[in-house]
Image (spheres, rainbow, N blue to C red):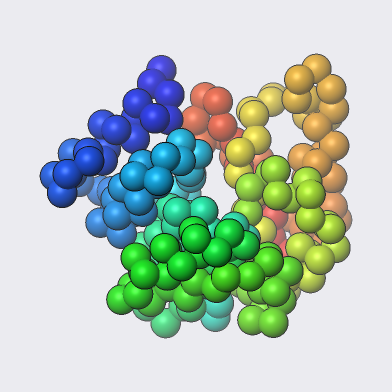
């Protein structure tokens, strides 16, 4: 299997020529190009991105991303969301935040230079997207409070595990166990690739 840098370089070259599947949105290609140019090798995977776009297509109101990075996740969300659905993403790193602001200046994505917790001022949201690493560091109840009833929280970057309780590195994956067993949500762990799974939790 190709690692992320190899796969990304096959999708996005260092020129204006793009070698990519026809279903890869142009907005996503631009974000991937920015990610490569800035030397970042971590970004939302294409498999996860297609899932994000599909989920976003069902959302009204406002959807949010915690941690913009180079804008790949936000690009997938915007590519799938209805035109009337607002997309907002927060990034604490000022250089990244302003770089993505410039890139998305004409694309109806609100990029804010702020801590993820500042997103609460713009909520509640019909969808919130963040990675497992962030979800493990952020106060759980503050994440829950970002989402309206019927809204969903999407957590990516889990390692697939068919057993219960879920394991990671030979130990119980407490973060995944807590989200999947929270009675306030109807949740599912979706394997999007052989090495990656995503939790979708819908608030009752």
Tell me where residue 139 sits by quadrant. Answer: bottom right
Q: Position of residue 93 (x, y in %)?
A: 58, 59
45, above or below 154, in the image: above
* For residue 39, side relative to residue 166 (left or right): left
Q: Position of residue 198 (x, y in %)?
A: 60, 42
Q: Position of residue 91 (x, y in %)?
A: 58, 63
Give the residue displayed 55% in from the left and 77% down from the top. 62
Residue placed furthest toward the left = 17
* For residue 90, side relative to residue 76 (left or right): right
Give the residue displayed 61% in from the left and 38% down from the top. 157
**Can see residue 46?**
no
Number of marks: 0
> Looking at the figure, which quarter contains the N terminus?
top left
**Can see residue 35?**
yes
* For residue 43, side relative to residue 6 (left or right): right
Q: Position of residue 70 (x, y in %)?
A: 45, 54
Q: Nearer the viewer, residue 72 or 179?
A: 72
Q: Nearer the viewer, residue 135 or 30?
A: 30
Tell me where residue 175 sits by quadrant. Answer: top right
Give the residue displayed 26% in from the left and 31% down from the top. 10
Q: Nearer the viewer, residue 56 or 13?
A: 13
* For residue 129, side relative to residue 3 (left or right): right
Give the residue displayed 55% in from the left and 64% down from the top. 94
124, above or below 5, in the image: below
> Looking at the figure, which quarter contains the C terminus?
bottom right
Residue placed furthest toward the front = 95
């Amino acid at each position: 299997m190709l690692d992320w840098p190899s796969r990304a370089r096959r999708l996005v070259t260092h020129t204006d020529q793009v070698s990519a599947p026809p279903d890869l949105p142009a907005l996503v290609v631009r974000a991937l190009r920015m990610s490569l140019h800035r030397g970042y090798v971590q970004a939302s995977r294409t498999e996860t991105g297609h899932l994000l776009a599909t989920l976003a297509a069902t959302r009204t109101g406002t959807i949010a991303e915690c941690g913009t990075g180079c804008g790949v996740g936000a690009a997938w969300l915007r590519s799938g969301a209805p035109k009337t659905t607002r997309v907002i993403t927060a990034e604490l790193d000022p250089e990244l935040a302003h770089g993505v602001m410039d890139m998305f200046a004409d694309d109806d994505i609100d990029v804010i230079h702020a801590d993820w917790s500042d997103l609460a001022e713009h909520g509640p949201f019909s969808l919130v997207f963040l990675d497992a690493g962030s979800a493990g560091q952020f106060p759980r109840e503050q994440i829950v409070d970002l989402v309206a009833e019927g809204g969903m929280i999407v957590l990516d970057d889990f390692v697939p595990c068919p057993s219960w309780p879920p394991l990671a590195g030979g130990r119980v994956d407490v973060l995944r166990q807590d989200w999947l067993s929270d009675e306030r949500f109807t949740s599912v762990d979706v394997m999007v690739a052989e090495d990656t799974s995503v939790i979708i939790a819908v608030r009752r």
